[in-house]
Image (tube, rainbow, N blue to C red):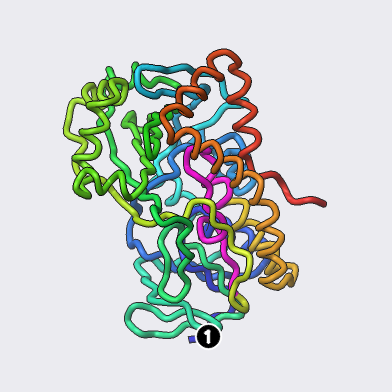
Amino acid sequence: MRLPGPLIVGGGPAGAAAAIVLARAGVRPTVLERHAVPHDALCGGFLSWSTASRLQHLGIDLATLGAHPVERVRLLAGNRQTEARLPQRCWSLSRRVLDARLLARAEEEGAEVWRGAKVARLVAGGAELAGGAAIEAEATILATGKHDLRGAGRPAMSTDPAVGLRWRLAGTAALQAMVGGAVELHLFAGGYAGLALQEDGSANLCMAVRRSVLASAGGDPVRLLERLAARHSALADRIAVAGSDPGLAQAVANVPYGWIAKHPAQGELRVGDQSAVIPSLAGEGIAIALASGTAAGLAIRDGIDAARFQKRLARRAQFPVRVAGAIARVGANPLGAAAIIEAVGLMPALSGLAARMSRMGEPAA
């Protein structure tokens, strides 16, 4: 089957942004989204001010969607904690709500969305669906997030790669009072966890941890969470006041934090986590998804080839990814985590500086 316009594999924020931009330009893309109904993705519930701005340009208003406002960042490690004001207002919103609205917006602009369409692999000039059907297109945008397609995988960045885990904590009044209008970063040896309230009052608990740390808990995410709670009272307090067992975690293995795409296949434009994987504690993953998806749509509109597009995007992503990676490495060491908390406690403006340095700027004119 030959499509009349570009093919977008993946209907998350990056794929939807590309679809919106292309449709606005009069180019009708086809988006293949593997989930038939809205779902919660593993991470991305925290939306920075740069993300909010990019969403506004795409026609998405976070306040209208009921997003929870976030004004402060709270850092916790062991028995230490401190907090500081964020440079600008941020938000927290479930991926289920955000992704559904972005895809609906793409359809409103004129994009075609195939829900429940599972892609087996990319092929030259298009993709092959799980059932074996081949789809051809003049350009292909790869927007599958942290999940790799066969034949289009990203290389490992470490012999001890990261594993992503996510739990949803019930939104009790006690938990809402404890977390409030802050995004929390719980730092521990070998990883970190982010916690923020969402639009329905529940809390999104996302964790990035080295595979060896998970292995030390027998490979069981629930056991790992229990062990971390036993060592970190603040995390234990939040789980306790949630009032119910957090249950099984969503998980994704071998997340290549720090990887940046530079040499795509012919006609293939990589966006989102398929283009640059920033450590999640920076809270910039969705902004990079939106920025890269938007840039891909503009590149196709303007006739810019995939290689040139990817090199430009890599240059934009390099600095924030490096900054976030350095902070994540320091924070995953107990002494480093203590030093970060001490420094931010003495100079709260440091947290704002780090936040600004890990934002992905606009392309040079």
Q: Residue at x 34, y 51 (%)?
A: 39
The reply to whether residue 187 is in sight is: yes
Labels in figure, total:
1
Image location of residue 164, percent across then percent down = 36, 48
Relative to the observer, which residue lies in front, 193 or 9? 193
* Side of 180 relative to 52 (left or right): left
Image location of residue 89, percent across then percent down = 57, 27
Instruction: Determine whether the residue tagged by mark 1 lies in a helix, strand or loop.
Output: loop
Mark 1, residue position: 2
The reply to whether residue 109 is in sight is: no
Residue at the far right in the pictured view: 365
- Within 10 Å of disc 1 (Cα), the crowding (few <14, some 14-19, many 20+) is few
Image location of residue 269, percent across then percent down = 60, 68
Q: Amino acid at mark 1?
A: Arg
Q: What's the magenta region?
A: 268-289
Q: Residue at x 62, y 51 (%)?
A: 291
Relative to the observer, which residue lies in front, 164 or 94? 164
Q: Residue at x 33, y 62 (%)?
A: 36
* Side of 21 relative to 232 (left or right): right
Q: Is residue 271 magenta?
A: yes
Compared to 269, does 356 lie above or below? above
Compared to 359, does 183 lie above or below? above
* Side of 300 relative to 271 (left or right): right
Residue at the far top in the pictured view: 346
Q: Residue at x 30, y 44 (%)?
A: 213
